Amino acid sequence: MSNSNTAATISNVANKTLTCIGNYRWRICALLFFSTTICYVDRMVMGLLKPTLMSELGWSETIYGDVMATFSICYGIGYLVVGRFMDKTGPKMGLALSVGLWSFFAMLHAAMSTAFGFKVARGGLGLAEGGNFPASIKAVTEWFPPKEQALATGIFNAGANVGAVLAPVCVPLIVLAWGWQAGFLVTGAIGFVWVLIWPFVYKKPEDHPKVTPAELAYIKSGCDSEVSDKVPTPSWPRVLCYRGTWSFIFGTVFSAPVWFFYCNWVPGFLFTKFGVHMFQAMVPLICIFCFADVGSIFGGWLSSFLIKKGWRVLSARKMAYFVCGASVIPVIMVAYTESLWVAVALISLAAAAHQGCSCNNYTIVGDTVPKSAVGTSVGIGGFVAYLVSMVLSMGLGRLLDATNNNYSLVFMIISCFYLVGLFFMHLVLPKAGTGKTPAGIDN
């Protein structure tokens, strides 16, 4: 048989296999991708408008840092409370409610003119956006087998970067046409379109009429879902007994504050260091967050690839995390370069590496705790991480005011955060685990 005939035969077999199994789960992943995109568009507006707001409203770095700290603590509380809510009610109505509420608060920013008013709007946005990731991770654990969960997480998590790319493209044009208030109004309104679609599309796979028996069997393969799905939502103390919960806490504490910094301070850093204003920052920010998209998908692909090669699940996740975490280290040089594009390249690499770490960190929760506790575990980790982010935001604003916007110490600290987090994750995770057991891994 010729090589061309062989290739054609393999392609036909692959297509028939995909058709027989079905791929409706990827439609769910696509909707999670879009909700995450909307989440980050709404979140990025404030950072893009930072120079404008500081100039028009007379804010200092300290005031700006305090406003962002309000978002951090409320986002953490949202993770904690809404994560628990998602475990009890499921992602269908929970995520729709979350997106609707954060869209309202995003638009509310336009009515504010004082720091206190922005804290109210920013706090409401944080509380509501706290539901996106717990709900999305729970949906992924319901709709994907373990060998695809990291890839699915990487894909929907890439929506964060797409949102971060769309925001610097769209917001300056909106602001130029209608003023800074319109930047909040127009972007906030988009979420209501998503809210109209999600409840009609999402059901659990076993209840969905468009899921074939073959796809359902594939989704359930490689996990103990038939046992863990029947377990009621565990109590808070029980969830804190899972090693996966503590792994997620450590992984998120040493990564989420860094991403918060990239989204909310990098536009200001580019303005302070290189004189790059909102319109001029469009291309650099697009580059940074496009590379972050690549990192998100690569991180998910890498651990899935290692699993398919025979690696144990947790070993594959940690190796992918290590590769990405080590790639962050060069960002330490950003504060010392005088070249805008060298700085952009270094931040781009770090942002891509962050997203690679992030998708594996989220996936470890699905690997190591029962499905009935996934939202609660993610919520606890997010709460602790954004409590830390609140403290760091307040400290960062005061540090920049005290040092005349010297970012060198900031980049030095964040360059090693991920590997420190991985060290603690390694300590708490089982050394020989291959995945999830009905009661979680080896408490």
Image: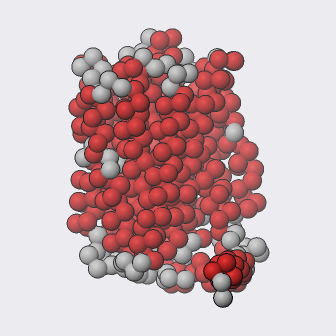
Please name the colour scheme applied to the rendered image: secondary structure
Residue 180 in sight: yes
Q: Is residue 417 left or right of residue 260?
A: left
* Above or below 227: residue 373: above
Q: What x and y, as percent, mark residue 443? A: 30, 76
412 lies left or right of 10? left
**Residue at the outermost bottom position:** 1
Q: Residue at x 64, y 50 (%)?
A: 34
Image quadrant in which you'd find residue 236? bottom left
Residue 87: x and y, percent?
A: 53, 64
Does residue 11 sit above or below 374 in this rendering?
Answer: below
The quadrant the N terminus occupies is bottom right
Q: Is 186 in front, or is 125? A: 186
Residue at coordinates 46% horizontally, 20% vertically from top-left? Answer: 276
* Side of 119 relative to 21 (left or right): left
For the image, the number of numbered tags is 0
Whether residue 254 can be seen here: no
Task: Report the residue at 50% width, 57% height from top.
Answer: 297
| Residue at the spot 32% in from the left edge and 53% down from the top edge | 325
**438 and 141: which is toward the camera:** 141
Residue 13's image quarter?
bottom right
- Image quadrant where residue 37 sits: top right
Residue 155 image position (x, y, % from top left): 55, 57
Q: Position of residue 134 (x, y in %)?
A: 50, 57
